[in-house]
Amino acid sequence: MPSPAGMSGNIAVSRALDTVLASLEDSKAENIVSIDIQRKSSLGDYMVVASGRSHRHVAAVADQLLTALKDAGHGTARVEGLAGADWVLIDSGDIIVHVFRPEVRDFYNLEKMWQTPDLEEETVH
């Protein structure tokens, strides 16, 4: 059974994920995919990948998301790539968000890499 601290942490992550997804939807981000990475990486609990239609749209989606996270009490997220707006990475700690222009998203194909099945406890050699 999870500890009370663990349960409150899960609730906080769930609320942050809800904030991220709602903000992306509100800003008309496209092809939003949420990937549970809890058993795949210590980087975070969820990775969210979305597309914007243009440089300007990617930047606007990212700006709105940063504001939504801060306004919802999730703190100030780290951000990279906002100046170029081909690929913006927003790291809120438990949730990592990638907002791409469609061509860049197709090139890197992060979903394919992160949506692989979870590995068993034993290491496969």
Image (cartoon, rainbow, N blue to C red):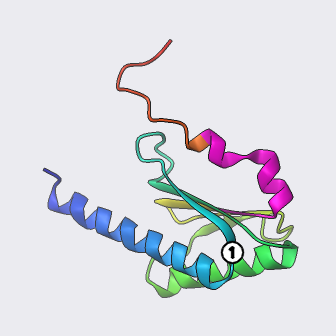
Residue at horizontal 77 percent and vertical 73 percent from the top: 58
Q: In this view, does 75 lie above or below 46?
A: below
Q: What residue is rendered at 57% in x and 70% in y?
A: 77
From the image, tell me which residue sits under label 1. Answer: 29
> Residue 62 at x, y = what percent?
69, 75
Q: Is residue 41 above or below residue 44?
A: above
- State the image quarter where residue 23 is shown: bottom right
Crowd band around label 1 with a 10 angstrom C-alpha radius: few (<14), some (14–19), many (20+): many
Identify whether 19 is placed above or below 9: below
Q: Position of residue 64 (x, y in %)?
A: 65, 83
**Residue at position x 61%, y 76% in the image:** 24
Which residue of the protein is positioned furthest toward the bottom in this rendering? Answer: 71
Q: Is residue 35 rendered to the left or right of residue 11?
A: right
Q: How many labels does the image show?
A: 1
The residue lying furthest to the top in this view is 125
The question of residue 55 being in magenta is answered with no
Q: What residue type is labelled 1?
A: Ala
Quarter of the image for residue 12 reads: bottom left
The picture places residue 53, in percent across and down from the top left corner, at 82, 73
Magenta span dominant secondary structure? helix
Element type where label 1 sits in the image: loop
> Could you tell me which residue is drawn at 48 percent across and 35 percent down?
117
Task: Tell me where the magenta segment starts and ends, as one range.
Answer: 98-113
Answer left or right for 93 relative to 114: left
